[in-house]
């Protein structure tokens, strides 16, 4: 005897089938737009950070051979800061540019590009992962951020390192931040060269952050000023970065 | 997924219900809980995953892959037509993929349509919140269920096919019976047939671990701790491709699974996954 599907059976299957459509309609009912729900969902990010730090410690991101590099490393975000200050510096080959490092440090310092390039350098061929899903492999040369922090000397209250950038989105300068665990990681560098050539403007000249354990939006380009803080509450909207404040990206972008 | 005809630890012999003849205790609580948890988790992860895919609707093999590199799969729009391209094969998918009409009646150039995604409008940050929150529930469920399946011998007793069941003649016979929509009756329905066992094992032992591990492989932070995952799957972009392939196969499994439930008697089947009790089809 073969089972004949009943009308009830089809109704049940239909209900199972439309469940995703009801779910996708959740935001119609306001559920997915409620900040409390978003924050609850976002708590998974803290869990990921704690667990990944526990598992990974200070382990290095994979490094590659030159033969494994992307033939074309696409640019992303801003590719030419619009401010006249920046464009004047760029026209002068960044000879007039200098990087300030202040905040919760013993000695606020300022370095020219030539001074930074004379510091101990690290070269690494690493994979850049955009939050959108693509990856590109490139070679970066720069000074370890830990070295710069050592030059300035951190005060006991220091917890985060904030990068203030020359490029703008919607009239607001880009900014990003990382904690000291990432700031002191050996592969966290401020790069002035890419693929064996001076860093191009499209990729963030004269200086950009490489924080190899996190996604691309953390790798601030066009860094003008570094500020050491105890809390991210006073920076921008308080979530630690431009995209974090503007559209709710996770501050910890390790996954 | 199911524990056919197994008595509960504290239950009556042979899984039969003395008070209600014909009913057997089919699915234990762990199985039922995990099943319905997965219904919710997989829907949320699939649909939020489609939003994440929409951010870059191209798939690559190897360590890297971006717009200038060769994509083996791409969903896009050319002019007023949407397309799905796999290798050299392009399929016009206007209205479904690549280019479709939104609720307001306006054409939208985006890979997956809003009815298939969480949230329904494109919001990568929010989709990642949903995806990465439910990933913990999904992973926790897999781990607990795997431990329970091993400890209770559910895996070895109910799910792994026996040597006799794996004989080609037996499998071919079962395929023939299924093709005629003739399903096991009576005592034979107490246990899974070999096609069920193979399908459930493929999902439990291959697809779910694959989708979870390829997901973890995409994490740059986890790459530092477990670089062997990159070696296992052939690089981050390969892992991303396999993540998508595994998710697609899980969707195919769910479609077949629901179709079989409908064909085999949906009320009895769904009751057995809610209360655990299943009425054996009469011989």
Image (spheres, helix red, strand yellow):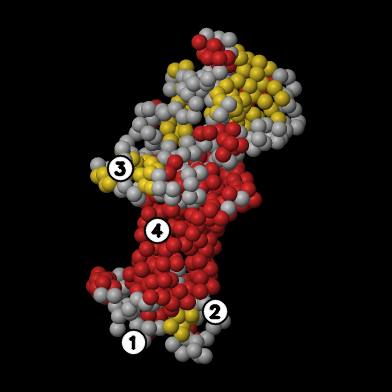
Q: Secondary structure at mark 2?
A: loop
- Asked whether the residues under the numbered discs 1 and 3 touch, taking CB atoms below 8 Å apart as contact, a structural biologist would say no
Query: What residue is drawn where x is 41% and y is 28%?
Result: A73
Identify which residue, B177 or B147, lies in the foreground: B177
Asked if badge 1 and badge 3 are on a common chain, one would say yes
- Asked whether the residues under the numbered discs 1 and 2 touch, taking CB atoms below 8 Å apart as contact, a structural biologist would say no
Mark 3, chain letter?
B
Q: Which label lies toward us, 1 or 3?
A: 3
Q: Quadrant of the N terminus of chain A?
A: bottom left
Q: Which label lies toward us, 3 or 4?
A: 3
From the viewer's perspective, is residue B33 above or below residue B245?
below
Mark 2, chain letter?
B
Q: Secondary structure at mark 1?
A: loop
Query: What residue is drawn where x is 29% and y is 75%?
Result: B181
Q: Which label lies toward us, 1 or 2?
A: 1
Judging by the rendered image, the residue that carries numbered circle 3 is B81
Could you tell me if residue B278 is visible in this image?
yes
Residue B40 percent coordinates (x, y): 50, 61
The disc, 1 or 2, on the residue closer to the chain's N-terminal end is 2
Judging by the rendered image, the residue that carries numbered circle 1 is B283
Mark 1, chain letter?
B
Question: Which disc number belongs to residue B250?
Answer: 4
Mark 1 vs mark 2, CA separation in Å: 28 Å
- Asked whether the residues under the numbered discs 3 and 2 touch, taking CB atoms below 8 Å apart as contact, a structural biologist would say no
Residue A39 percent coordinates (x, y): 63, 48
Mark 4, chain letter?
B
From the viewer's perspective, is residue B107 above or below residue B33?
above
Question: Which disc number belongs to residue B109?
Answer: none
Mark 1 vs mark 4, CA separation in Å: 33 Å
């Amino acid at each position: 005897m073969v089972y004949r599907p009943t009308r009830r059976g089809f109704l049940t299957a239909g209900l199972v089938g439309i469940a995703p459509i009801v779910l996708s309609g959740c935001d119609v009912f306001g559920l997915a737009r409620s900040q409390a729900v978003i924050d609850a969902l976002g708590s998974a990010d803290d869990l990921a950070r704690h667990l990944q730090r526990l598992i990974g410690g200070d382990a290095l991101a994979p490094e590659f051979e030159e033969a494994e590099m992307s033939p074309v490393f696409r640019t992303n975000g801003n590719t030419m800061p619009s401010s006249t200050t920046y464009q004047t510096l760029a026209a002068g080959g960044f000879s007039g540019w200098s990087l300030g490092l202040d905040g919760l440090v013993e000695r606020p310092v300022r370095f020219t590009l030539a001074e930074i390039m004379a510091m101990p350098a690290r070269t690494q061929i690493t994979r850049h992962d955009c939050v959108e899903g693509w990856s590109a492999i490139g070679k970066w040369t720069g000074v370890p951020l830990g070295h710069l922090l050592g030059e300035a000397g951190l005060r006991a209250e220091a917890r985060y390192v904030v990068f203030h950038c020359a490029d703008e989105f919607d009239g607001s300068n880009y900014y990003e931040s990382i904690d000291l665990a990432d700031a002191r990681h050996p592969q966290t560098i401020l790069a002035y060269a890419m693929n064996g050539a001076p860093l191009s403007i499209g990729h963030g000249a004269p200086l950009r952050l490489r924080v190899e354990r996190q996604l691309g939006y953390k790798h601030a380009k066009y860094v003008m000023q570094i500020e050491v803080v105890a809390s991210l509450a006073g920076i921008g909207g308080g979530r630690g970065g431009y995209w974090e404040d503007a559209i709710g990206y996770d501050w910890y972008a390790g996954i | 997924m199911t524990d056919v005809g197994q008595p509960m630890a504290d239950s009556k012999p042979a899984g039969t219900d003395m008070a209600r003849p014909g009913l057997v205790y089919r699915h234990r609580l762990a199985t039922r809980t995990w099943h319905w948890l997965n219904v919710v988790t997989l829907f949320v992860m699939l649909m939020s995953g489609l939003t994440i895919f929409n951010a870059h609707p191209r798939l690559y093999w190897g360590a890297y892959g971006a717009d200038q590199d060769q994509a083996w799969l791409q969903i896009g729009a050319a002019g007023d037509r949407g397309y799905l391209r796999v290798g050299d094969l392009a399929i016009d998918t206007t209205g479904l993929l690549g280019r479709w009409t939104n609720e307001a009646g306006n054409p939208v150039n985006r890979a997956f349509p809003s009815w298939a995604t969480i949230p329904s409008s494109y919001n990568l940050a929010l989709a990642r919140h949903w995806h990465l929150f439910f990933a913990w529930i999904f992973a926790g469920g897999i781990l607990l269920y795997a431990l329970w399946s091993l400890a209770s011998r559910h895996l070895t007793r109910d799910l792994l096919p026996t040597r006799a069941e794996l004989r080609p003649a037996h499998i071919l016979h079962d395929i023939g019976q299924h093709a005629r929509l003739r399903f096991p009756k009576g005592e034979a329905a107490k246990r899974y047939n070999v096609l069920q066992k193979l399908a459930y094992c493929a999902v439990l032992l291959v697809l779910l671990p694959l989708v979870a591990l390829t997901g973890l492989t995409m994490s740059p932070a986890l790459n530092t701790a477990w670089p062997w995952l990159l070696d296992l799957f052939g690089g981050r972009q390969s892992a991303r491709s396999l993540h998508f392939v595994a998710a697609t196969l899980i969707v195919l499994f769910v479609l077949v699974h629901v179709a079989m439930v409908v064909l085999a008697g949906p009320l009895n089947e769904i009751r057995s996954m809610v209360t655990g009790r299943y009425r054996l089809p009469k011989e």
